[in-house]
Image (cartoon, rainbow, N blue to C red):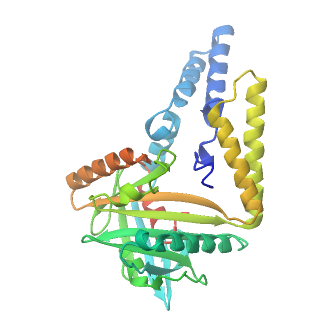
Amino acid sequence: MSERVGLGAADASTRWIGIRRHQAVLVVAGVGLLSDWILARRAPFAEAVAGLALLACAAPCLDGLTIGEQAALAVRYAVRSHWWRYDVSEFGDDVVVFFGAEVALRGYELVHRGRLDLSGSDLALAEALGALVDAASAARGGQHISEHVVRRDRIAATLLCLPVGVAAPSGWEPRNSLALEVLEAASGTRAQVLERFTYVRTPDRLARTFRVLDFSSVPPTRGLLEELLRSLTPLDVALHVEVVGAERAQRVASRAVHRVGSDDSTTRAAGFRRTARSARNLERLAQREVLVAAGRSLLRLATFVVVSGSTYAELQSRSAAVWRTSHDAGLRLERGWGRQGPWYRSQLPGGPGW
């Protein structure tokens, strides 16, 4: 988003009259069942129980999810297999990852040249990456790009994973070995992950994956992930970018403006006041539509923070430290209880879980 309007809430968290759409459906259905049980003669008691259950499912719970969403996650976790396996192979200059879906990528490592912010190279690097994703939007189906900052023995490295056939900007050197290190698997081997409710167990470590939910509280004078990356706690950060194709991007941007504008008109017609948040959101979406129409790329972003430890106690202490650091930096994290397997899969280079 542009600097004038800034970042806002994700499109997936769009609210209507202050609540999410599925909450409105649950509340309306719950109130309808309770009203029918009260007014109708000899209505079954099960109807009242169902109405109360629907109202309870609409109540907010952990990580901004409702009780109904948490219950659905727990059920899916209980019925699916907890063993996750993926194959990693090298074919020439390509790394192929098969984890439910096959992804081919090439890894590039950033050539660090001291303090980038003292020489202005950080701005040039950001502009080069911006030009890269703008060019990728011309692809008919879009493309998936990921950037990983990994720490190994107090040494940090930055990995850029690009689809086959996409050239890396200047300042990045081919380094598939770093991609294999992040994947925790040698070429031609199969890696296994055991999913637990709050973490996953790999052959070498215990890992817990958080997802950044909101950047909007980060001070404007700070980088979005600056405080997190400067944390003394060992962690990996994975930024995944799905570049939406140009034709689809224009449709998505225009539909978002139409949806929010229609909801705003409906709420005002119903007697609700237009809030500053809704006005800012509509302005942000309208500006995004203008930028997309001018040829800028539309991106789906996901930022994952992976904390690891050799024991569960170490994992817990490091996770608590990262949670405090993120909170102090203005970042909102999602814990992902019951989704550790899918999130670990999604944060891997190339995003095989997308």
Which corner quadrant of the image does residue 201 belong to? Answer: bottom left
Which corner quadrant of the image does residue 156 belong to? Answer: bottom left
Looking at the picture, how far across and down is residue 207, in whole percent? 32, 59
Looking at the picture, how far across and down is residue 71, in whole percent? 48, 38
| 204 up-or-down from 250: above or below | below
* Residue 188 visible in the displayed image: no
Image quadrant holding the C terminus, namely bottom right
Looking at the picture, how far across and down is residue 329, in whole percent? 39, 48
Residue at horizontal 36%, vertical 74%?
157
Which corner quadrant of the image does residue 136 belong to? Answer: bottom right
Image quadrant holding the N terminus, namely bottom right
Q: On the rendered structure, is 348 left or right of 50?
A: left
Looking at the picture, how far across and down is residue 161, in whole percent? 50, 75
Residue at horizontal 59%, vertical 48%?
10
> Of 338 and 111, which appears nearest the observer?
111
Residue at horizontal 57%, vertical 50%?
7
Q: How many marks?
A: 0
Q: On the rendered structure, is 161 left or right of 322?
A: right
> Of 170 and 58, which appears nearest the observer?
170
| 300 up-or-down from 137: above or below | above
> Of 306 and 222, which appears nearest the observer?
222
* Residue 59 visible in the displayed image: yes
